Image (tube, rainbow, N blue to C red):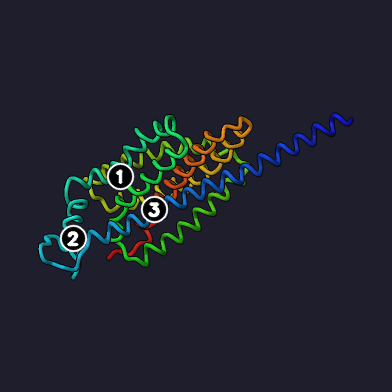
C-alpha cells in the first residue's frame, strides 16, 4: 500500500511539474508573438511615414489631396521591388524557416523570427496609405478579442482538432492561389469571397495551432530538452503570429474605412 501511495505522489508531482512547465511555455509563446506583432506594427508605421510626403516638389505620384509618395514610397509600392516585398517573407516561410529551426540555436531562431516580423512590417505598411488610422485600430481590437477567444477555446477544448487543422492548412494553399489569380483579375466579388473564407480559415487555425502547441509540449516535456522546447515555443509563436496577422488583414477588408 505504501508503494502505491509513493507512486501516486510521484505521478502527481510529475503532473504538477508538467502543468507549471506548460504555463511557462505558453507564456513564452504568447510573449514572443506579442513582441513580433509590436515589431511589425512599428516597422509598418515607420515605413509608411517614410513613403509619404506633403511636399509635391519632385513627386510624381499623388495619393490624395496634399499627400504624395516619396522616392522611397515609389520604389517599394510602384516598382518591381514591390514583388520582393510581397513574396520575400512568403519565400522565407517556405524555404528558410524549416532550415533555421533545424540548424540554428534557439537564440538564432528567435532573431530570425524578429527579422521576419520586420519584413512583414515593410510589406504591411501600405495599409496606412489605404485605410484610416481609426479603422485600423478598431479592426486590431476586434481581431485581438476574436483571437484571444479562439485561442482560449483551442487550449481548453477536449475535442481533437488535428483533422480540422489539416483541412484548414490545405485551404490556405487554395486561398493563396486564389489571391494570386485575383491580383490579375481584380474582381471585387472574388475579393469579398476571399476575405470571408480567409476569416473562417484563420479563425479555425488559431484554435488548432493553440491546441497543437499545448500537445507538443506535453508529449516532449518528459525528454527535458530545453533547447528544443525553446525553439518549439518560437515556432508556436510564429504559427499564432501568422494566424493573427492574416485574421487581421481579412477582417480589415470588411471593417476598414478607406481613405
Pointer 1: residues within 10 angstroms few (<14), some, or many (20+)?
some
**Residue tagged 3:** 39
First-in-chain label (2 vs 3): 3
- Report the disc number at residue 26: none
Residue 138: x %, y % from top left: 41, 64
* Disc 1 secondary structure class: helix
Q: Residue at x 57, y 32 (%)?
A: 225
Secondary structure under tag 3 reads: helix
In the displayed image of the protein, which residue is found farthest to the right? Answer: 1
Left or right side of 178 for 197: right
Spatial distance from mark 1 to mark 2, Cα to Cα? 26 Å
Residue sitting nearer the eye, 70 or 214: 70
Closer to us: 126 or 191: 126
- Separation of marks 3 and 1 at Cα, in angstroms: 26 Å
Residue 250 seen by the camera: no
The crowding category of the residue bearing disc 3, from other C-alpha atoms within 10 Å (few below 14, some 14 to 19, many at least 20), is many
Instruction: Say which quadrant the C terminus sits in.
Output: bottom left
Q: Is residue 122 above or below residue 84?
A: below
Position of residue 47 in the picture relative to residue 224 (left or right)? left
Residue at figure coordinates x 12%, y 62% from the top left? 59
Report the residue marked by disc 2: 69
Q: Is residue 87 in view?
A: yes
* Residue lying at the far bottom of the rendered structure: 66
The residue that disc 1 covers is 179
Whichever of labels 3 and 1 marks the residue nearer the N terminus, that label is: 3
Amino acid at each position: 500500500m505504501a508503494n502505491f501511495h509513493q507512486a501516486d505522489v510521484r505521478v502527481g508531482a510529475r503532473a504538477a511539474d508538467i502543468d507549471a512547465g506548460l504555463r511557462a511555455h505558453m507564456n513564452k509563446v504568447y510573449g514572443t508573438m506579442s513582441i513580433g506583432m509590436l515589431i511589425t506594427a512599428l516597422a509598418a508605421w515607420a515605413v509608411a511615414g517614410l513613403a509619404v510626403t506633403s511636399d509635391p516638389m519632385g513627386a510624381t505620384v499623388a495619393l490624395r489631396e496634399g499627400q504624395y509618395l516619396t522616392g522611397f514610397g515609389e520604389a517599394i509600392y510602384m516598382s518591381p521591388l514591390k514583388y520582393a516585398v510581397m513574396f520575400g517573407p512568403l519565400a522565407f516561410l517556405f524555404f528558410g524557416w524549416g532550415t533555421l529551426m533545424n540548424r540554428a540555436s534557439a537564440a538564432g531562431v528567435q532573431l530570425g523570427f524578429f527579422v521576419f516580423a520586420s519584413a512583414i512590417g515593410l510589406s504591411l505598411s501600405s495599409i496606412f496609405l489605404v485605410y484610416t488610422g481609426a479603422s485600423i485600430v478598431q479592426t486590431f481590437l476586434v481581431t485581438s478579442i476574436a483571437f484571444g477567444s479562439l485561442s482560449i477555446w483551442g487550449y481548453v477544448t477536449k475535442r481533437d482538432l488535428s483533422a480540422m487543422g489539416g483541412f484548414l492548412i490545405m485551404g490556405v494553399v487554395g486561398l493563396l492561389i486564389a489571391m494570386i489569380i485575383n491580383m490579375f483579375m481584380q474582381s471585387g466579388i472574388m475579393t469579398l469571397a476571399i476575405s470571408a473564407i480567409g476569416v473562417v480559415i484563420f479563425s479555425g487555425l488559431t484554435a488548432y495551432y493553440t491546441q497543437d502547441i499545448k500537445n507538443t509540449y506535453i508529449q516532449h516535456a518528459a525528454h527535458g530538452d530545453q533547447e528544443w522546447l525553446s525553439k518549439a515555443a518560437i515556432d508556436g509563436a510564429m504559427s499564432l503570429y501568422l494566424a493573427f496577422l492574416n485574421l487581421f488583414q481579412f477582417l480589415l477588408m470588411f471593417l476598414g474605412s478607406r481613405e
